[in-house]
Image (cartoon, rainbow, N blue to C red):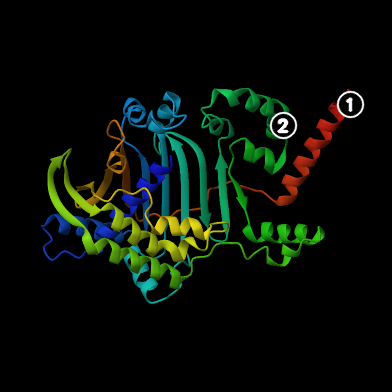
């Protein structure tokens, strides 16, 4: 799983930096990619979908030697997709210019996250949207249970559901709505104040700092990351035509994996340092590019109708012990429609959660007496 996440980052960063390469000839392979990203940058909303494009059998063949990896894991990975989106009042190209000037380009922006099976049109397991000053959440609790493919845990999960989860799901109010797959809204300011108050009531010395652990990515840090990535990707990337398939032009992008990983790690460090709990030793390991082979790797970029359609990266390139191809694909979609708040969301306050848990504990205590 760790290799997959690392490679996903490689793919995303290759594609993100391709537009910054600045080809002189728009008909060249690099120019096609550059123009396609510029077209994507004119959109106010961009959605990126990440998933394995190989079959379940291919995934199992490539990863069966990983400790504990099973056919059930392969079946799951073949259907899982992670989709993230972002939108702004400005197009992405104008947003980038605002960042380079140190402006607050995040004002009026919104974001979305989706974990699904068989793509965005399939079963939605988790949906999160950040719009305005609120976060909106919807989850398929029963569907999420299936993410644990370990048969040994099935009994304990079923017991937990029978004893606790089913009771909470049947409860009225916002907690029941959340556990039944309805949209709920969360106000971070309300929850932050609640946590601070709770810590203070317990006499915790960290109560006054409870808000300090919230990661923030200010314009200066964002600009450092963008500049660093642009430098990493313009230094050693090469582009070559790979013909037409399915009505799309395919371009091969090649980078030296180890040096690229080191440059990228240095570039994103200012942002990663703001993640609570992340150790300096982890950052140091990233910057040494541990486990990344000292060889060149390639990604296939598909451009259709002048727009970036997808980028595919074979994880087999990062593991000489892999027994077969393991293609990971990043799909792109641009839109002028903004990410909006869902209708009918119920407000989920911390007091609702505490009340539901206390009621559940009370019922459990009473039942244990008989």
Q: Position of residue 345 (x, y in %)?
A: 60, 47
Point 34% across, 67% down: residue: 228
Q: Which residue is mark 1?
A: 369
> What element does badge 1 sit on?
loop
> What element does badge 2 sit on?
helix
Query: For residue 50, which quarter of the picture?
Result: top left
- How many numbered discs sit on the rendered protein? 2
Q: Is residue 44 above or below residue 68?
A: below
Q: Position of residue 132 (x, y in %)?
A: 54, 60
Relative to 292, is 84 on the left or the right? Answer: right
Quarter of the image for the C terminus: give it. Answer: top right
Relative to 250, is 180 on the left or the right? Answer: right
Q: Nearer the viewer, residue 265 or 358?
A: 265
Q: Is residue 255 above or below residue 206?
A: above
Q: Position of residue 1 (x, y in %)?
A: 43, 39
Q: Position of residue 293 (x, y in %)?
A: 30, 48
Q: Which residue is mark 2?
A: 164
Relative to 11, is 235 on the left or the right? Answer: left
Q: Nearer the viewer, residue 19 or 176?
A: 19
Q: Nearer the viewer, residue 74 or 317?
A: 317
Question: Looking at this rendering, what residue extends furthest in the bottom direction?
Answer: 101
Point 23% across, 52% down: residue: 307
Marks 2 and 1, how far apart at CA: 17 Å
Q: Is residue 116 above or below residue 196?
A: above
Q: How packed is label 1: few (under 14 Cα within 10 Å), some, or many (20 or more)?
A: few
Q: Nearer the viewer, residue 150 or 289?
A: 289
Q: First in sequence: mark 2 or mark 1? A: 2
Query: For residue 176, which quarter of the picture?
Result: top right
Query: Given contact means CB atoms under 8 Å apart, are the residues at marks 2 and 1 in contact?
Result: no
Q: How packed is label 2: few (under 14 Cα within 10 Å), some, or many (20 or more)?
A: some
């Amino acid at each position: 799983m760790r290799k997959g996440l690392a490679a996903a980052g490689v793919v995303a960063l290759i594609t993100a930096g391709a537009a910054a390469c600045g080809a002189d000839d728009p008909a060249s392979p690099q120019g096609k990619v550059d123009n396609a990203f510029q077209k994507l940058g004119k959109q106010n909303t961009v959605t990126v979908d990440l998933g394995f494009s190989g079959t379940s059998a291919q995934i199992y063949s490539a990863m069966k030697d990983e400790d504990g990896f099973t056919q059930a894991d392969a079946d799951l990975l073949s259907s899982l997709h992670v989709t993230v989106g972002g939108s702004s009042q400005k197009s992405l190209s104008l947003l980038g210019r605002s960042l380079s000037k140190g402006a607050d380009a995040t004002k009026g922006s919104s974001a979305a996250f989706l974990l699904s099976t068989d793509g965005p049109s399939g079963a939605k397991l988790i949906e999160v949207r950040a719009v305005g000053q609120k976060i909106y959440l919807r989850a398929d609790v029963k569907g999420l249970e299936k993410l644990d493919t370990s048969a040994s845990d099935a009994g304990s999960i079923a017991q937990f559901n029978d004893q606790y989860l089913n009771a909470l799901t049947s409860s009225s109010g916002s907690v029941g709505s959340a556990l039944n797959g309805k949209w709920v809204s969360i106000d971070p300011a309300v929850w932050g104040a609640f946590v601070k108050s709770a810590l203070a009531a317990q006499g915790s010395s960290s109560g006054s700092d409870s808000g300090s652990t919230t990661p923030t990515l200010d314009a200066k840090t964002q600009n450092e990351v963008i500049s660093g990535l642009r430098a990493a990707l313009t230094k050693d990337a090469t582009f070559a035509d790979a013909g037409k398939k399915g009505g799309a032009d395919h371009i091969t992008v090649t980078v030296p994996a180890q040096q690229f990983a080191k440059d990228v790690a240095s570039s994103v460090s200012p942002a990663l340092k703001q993640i609570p709990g992340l150790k300096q030793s982890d950052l140091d390991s990233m910057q040494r590019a541990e486990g990344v082979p000292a060889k060149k790797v390639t990604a296939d970029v598909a451009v259709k109708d002048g727009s970036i359609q997808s980028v595919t990266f074979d994880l087999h390139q990062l593991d000489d012990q892999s027994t077969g191809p393991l293609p990971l694909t990043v799909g792109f979609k641009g839109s002028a429609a903004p990410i909006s708040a869902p209708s009918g969301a119920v407000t989920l306050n911390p007091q609702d959660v505490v009340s539901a848990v206390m009621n559940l504990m009370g019922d459990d205590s009473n039942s244990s007496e008989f």
